[in-house]
Image: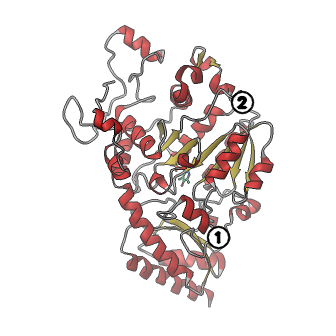
Amino acid sequence: MSEVPITADEATHEFGFHTRSVHAGQRPDPNTGARAVPIFQTTSYVFEDPESAAAYFNLQEYGNTYSRIMNPTVAAFEERVANLEGGVGAVAFASGLAAQAAAFVTMLCPGDHVIASSALYGGSITQLKHLFGKLSVELTFVDPDDIDNWRSAIAQNTKLLFGETIGNPGGNVLDIEALAGLAHEHDIVLMVDNTFATPYLCRPMEWGADIVVHSATKFIGGHGTSIGGVVVESGKFDWSNGRFSVVADPSPAYHGLPFHNTFGIYGYLMKLRAETLRDLGAALSPFNAFLFLQGLETLALRIDRHVDNTEAVAQYLAARPDVDRVRYAGLESSKYRKLKERYLPKGAGAVFCFDIQGGWRCGQEFIRNVTLWSHLANVGDAKSLIIHPESTTHRQLNVEELAAAGITPGTIRLSVGLEDVQDLIWDLERGFEAAARARE
Ligand SMILES: *Cc1c(COP(=O)(O)O)cnc(C)c1O
């Protein structure tokens, strides 16, 4: 791979977030001068000679071999996300859930124990409970708000704590620094799903998180067009601490290579790419990586606007008598206000839930009668989105899990987009009128 020259000035200057959102991980293409990141729509790469081909496959040199494992367009995306999150590197995947699964598989063995927040994305709960349950990974879900819940769940075989910066549907803000302290006291990993916050609002690694995962499908892509995910690592975790032999010991899946000893701070990421991505095969397409790079270029601008609109919509809802509660951490009245001020000073994101009076029926009527808000199962689009979690995204959960997740029959989830906020509120008004008719 061509080395990118960096001038001495550039190497010492600290670029701001907006500049890095636009430039990190890419320079004009040395062969063509193309300013935008080219879409390298190729499966494979011609080797210079047999020796370098062998060196690439031995991981003695880092070079492109096959696009299931690496691709220059995907690499630009990986480098940009790693830069924005403050990690040493990143590996992209075909979806957020693929990224998470790969991050878990790379560090966990049967019999290992994971402690996860009960306020996770529904698909993450299902993945951990059923897929990883089948692989004999033990699991404890805890109410994430009290550090003592996490502490008392730690057992001899615990390897990982996992939570979301901003949980759903409660808007729980994770006390990342406290959790990182707890994890490191026990030589275990803290992994944070930063999808709802994005690196613009919060960078969990600055508070001690070891691994950050994203569903790039959401705000990073930002336009509801592409599925993808990414894993970022801080490079600070000591995988040779005796508890992660699967990362540190010679790997039978890579002719005895000890990843952590060989690659140091890049060991976990190298194993994630050269083994897990190779074997699971959930590679991000170069085209989707291109769209995510475009998304990152405007991430900060979009998120500021998402947050402004969301604060206005949340305040409007909180003032209504037919709304039981609004669970947005950006509201003054939120029980997460202190944590929000600490971890999310620029805003609490654009996804939150509220509970409408009248339960399931009023919730459904509300959704049926709004039109500007699109009824669908996604978040983080430029367009405003609405859904009834109990009948859709959280349908797989049983009664206790729904209660633990804080979802009631009247819970409605919003993902606030970039439209004019007056229009969004105008449309919500129509939903409330329909819900009132249903109540009569
Ligand atoms: C959507 C989402 C995921 C899963 O990502 P996909 O790209 O849909 O696989 C994981 N975590 C959170 C918080 C999400 O919103």
Q: Which mark is residue 159?
A: none
Q: Secondary structure at mark 1?
A: loop
Q: Which quadrant is the N terminus positioned in?
A: top left
Vertical placement of residue 307 versus 210, above or below: below
Residue type marked 2: Arg
Q: Which residue is located at x 50 percent, y 81 percent?
A: 316
Q: CA distance from mark 2 to mark 1?
A: 36 Å
Q: Residue furthest top?
A: 51
| The image quarter in which residue 190 lies | top right
Q: Which quadrant is the C terminus positioned in?
A: bottom right
Vertical placement of residue 118 versus 154, above or below: below
Q: Secondary structure at mark 2?
A: loop
| Position in image of residue 422 (x %, y %) | 39, 80
Question: Is residue 361 left or right of 418 when viewed as pictured?
Answer: right
Are discs 2 and 1 less than 8 Å apart at CB?
A: no
Residue type marked 1: Lys
| Position in image of residue 304 (x %, y %) | 40, 64
Question: Is residue 351 left or right of 409 when viewed as pictured?
Answer: left
Q: Which residue is located at x 58 percent, y 21 percent?
A: 261
Q: Which residue is located at x 42 percent, y 52 percent?
A: 220
Which residue is denoted by mark 1 in the rendering? 335
Vertical placement of residue 392 versus 54, above or below: below
The answer to whether residue 403 is seen in the rendering is yes
Instruction: Categorize mark 1 by other alpha carbons within 10 Å: few (<14), some (14-19), many (20+).
Output: some
Disc 2 under 8 Å from ligand 1? The reply is no
The answer to whether residue 126 is seen in the rendering is no
| Position in image of residue 170 (x %, y %) | 63, 65
Vertical placement of residue 5 versus 209, above or below: above
Which residue is denoted by mark 2 in the rendering? 243
| Position in image of residue 426 (x %, y %) | 42, 82
Q: Earlier in the sequence, mark 2 or mark 1?
A: 2
